[in-house]
Image: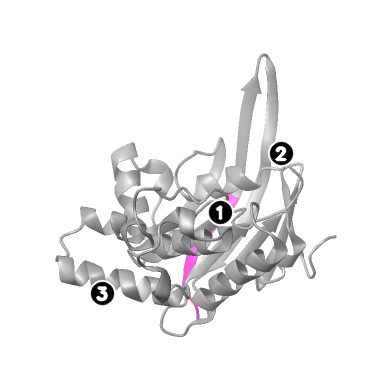
Amino acid sequence: MSELLIEMKGLTRKFKRDSVEISVLRGIDLQISEGDFISLMGPSGSGKSTLLNIIAGIDRPSGGELRVLDADILSMSEDQLATWRNRHVGFVFQHFNLIPVLTAFGNVELPLLLTHLSRKERREHVLKALELVGLSDRADHYPRQLSGGQEQRVAIARAIITDPTFILADEPTGDLDAESAEEVMKVLAGLNKDEHFRKTIILVTHDPRAAAFATTRFYLDKGVLVEHPRVPA
């Protein structure tokens, strides 16, 4: 039986705009287990990224309960959250956020520079991560020498280099053409299915084709979360 990683009960998030209170999340109940691949769809402003940020401890809910890895992250200080995120969360964003003056190898290695690994150990980890995303032959290439899809795969390699417990992907195909988007989603699906790696993935997307790679699909609209047996058009 898979371990329960994330559990939220009655989660709410409200913002104030001038004197008006806006409810972005309305009583979200959600459980995510080890090895799940979850997609979150919904219109712009529906609260998808807000929910992702709350799971990551970047934003805090207005009410409700949230436990991640059986820890009450709502009670953590900012320093504790930063340490927790570095250990457990891998981020993949719509914009690749690669450093132009570093090669693919250098970009992926960056998070490891904060560890106690030797140079040899870092090299082994980086080459393995690049292999997992299908870019072993692009280690010495700079971002300008890569396609958009390859840049995003480098960003995925950077996200997994510290072996996080789960991956949060916010519109990872939003800047890509259909072919590159499919390549990226195949990489994420492979990381989820690999029996030795088995990464839990939570994906926010507008793209039904990307959402179709997930094993469980949810739709978020007006702050309410519902599970969909198939992705809404």
Check if residue 4 falls in the magenta segment. yes
* Mark pair 2, 1: CA separation: 20 Å
One can see residue 65 in this view: no
Image spot of residue 112 (x, y percent): 26, 59
Q: Which residues are magenta?
A: 1-9
Secondary element under disc 2, as helix, strand or loop, is loop
Please give the name of the residue rendered at 19% of the width and 71% of the height, measured from the top-left corner. Answer: 121
Check if residue 36 falls in the magenta segment. no
Secondary element under disc 1, as helix, strand or loop, is strand
Mark whose residue sits in front, 3 or 2: 3
Q: Residues within 10 Å of mark 1 (few under 14, many from 20)?
A: some
One can see residue 90 in this view: yes
Under mark 2, the amino acid is Gly
Given the current orientation, which residue lies at the most extreme top position?
19
| Residue at numbered disc 3 | 124
Image spot of residue 72 (x, y percent): 41, 50
- Residue closer to the observer: 139 or 189: 139
| Residue at numbered disc 1 | 8
Please give the name of the residue rendered at 66% of the width and 45% of the height, measured from the top-left corner. Answer: 27
